[in-house]
Each structure stands twice: as C-alpha cells, then as structure tokens.
Image (cartoon, helix red, strand yellow):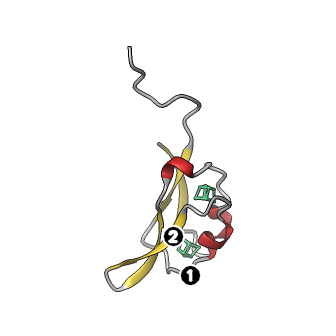
Amino acid sequence: MAALQPAGPRKALPEVSARCTGCGRCVAVCPPRVLWLDLKGWKKTAVLHDAAHCTGCAQCVPACPFDAITMKRA
Ligand code: SF4
Ligand code: SF4
C-alpha cells in the first residue's frame, strides 16, 4: 500500500508573514538557497520556492530582523 506521507521524518518549513519587508537577509543565510525574493503586489517578500530542498535548519528564522518567519510542521 502506498504511504500517505513521504519517507523520513516530517520537517518544519518556514512560513513568511506579512511583516516581511523584503530585506533579503533570510535569502542570504539559507544554505541550500531555496528562499527567494518575489514581488507580491508592489513589495518584495521572501518566498520558499523549493520546499523539497529546504532542510528545515531554521537558520532563516533568527536572520530576520522583523520576526517575520516561523517554522511550521508540514
Ligand atoms: S529552514 Fe534552512 S533550508 Fe529552509 S529556508 Fe530556512 S534557512 Fe533555508
Ligand atoms: S529576513 Fe525577514 S524581512 Fe527580510 S526578506 Fe527575510 S522574511 Fe522578509
């Protein structure tokens, strides 16, 4: 029978809130470079582009000066 969850432990993924100012610090510290800045309407915001390659390391969380990132279990 097919597994409903992918193999391995479930990891937490970063969620970016509306507090994001688009400063790019989280993008700079992400080791696998899976966070990018995207235009959302008129402002830039951090977006997780490749959840499969996010390691869940949470280094992006303390890098954010605006407390805009929280780790949420997928
Ligand atoms: S948790 Fe780690 S790998 Fe995932 S986006 Fe943040 S810094 Fe990058
Ligand atoms: S560090 Fe924080 S404010 Fe800056 S781009 Fe990342 S989430 Fe947005």
The residue lying furthest to the bottom in this view is 42
Residue 42 sits in quarter: bottom left
Q: Specify the quarter for ligand 2.
A: bottom right
Find disc 1 in the rendering and name its residue. 23
How busy is the neighbourhood of tag 2: few (under 14 within 10 Å), some, or many (20 plus)?
some
Crowding at label 1, few (<14), some or many (≥20) Cα neighbours within 10 Å? some
Q: Residue 36 has which mark?
A: 2
Residue 31 placement, left or right of 71: right
Residue 39: x %, y % from top left: 39, 79
Q: Is residue 6 above or below residue 56?
A: above
Where, by quadrant of the figure, is residue 4 drawn? top left
Residue that protrudes farthest toward the left in the picture: 41
Return the mark for residue 70.
none
Quadrant containing the N terminus in the rendered view:
top left
**Residue 42 visible in the picture:** yes
Q: Are marks 2 and 1 in contact (CB under 8 Å)?
A: no
Camera-nearest label, 2 or 1:
2
* Kind of residue at disc 1: Cys
- For the point 68% across and 60% down, the residue is 31
- Picture coordinates of residue 23, whole percent (x, y): 56, 81
Lateral position of residue 13 relative to residue 61, left or right = left
Residue 58, given in percent of the width and then of the height, sits at 64, 55
Of the two numbered discs 2 and 1 on the same chain, state the one appearing first in sequence: 1
SS category of the residue bearing label 1: loop
Position in image of residue 50 (x %, y %): 49, 55
Instruction: Give how far apart the Cα atoms at labels 2 and 1 are.
Output: 11 Å
Residue at 68 percent of width and 68 percent of height: 29
* Whether residue 64 can be seen here: no
Q: Is mark 1 within 8 Å of ligand 2?
A: yes
Amino acid at dot 2: Trp
Count the marks: 2
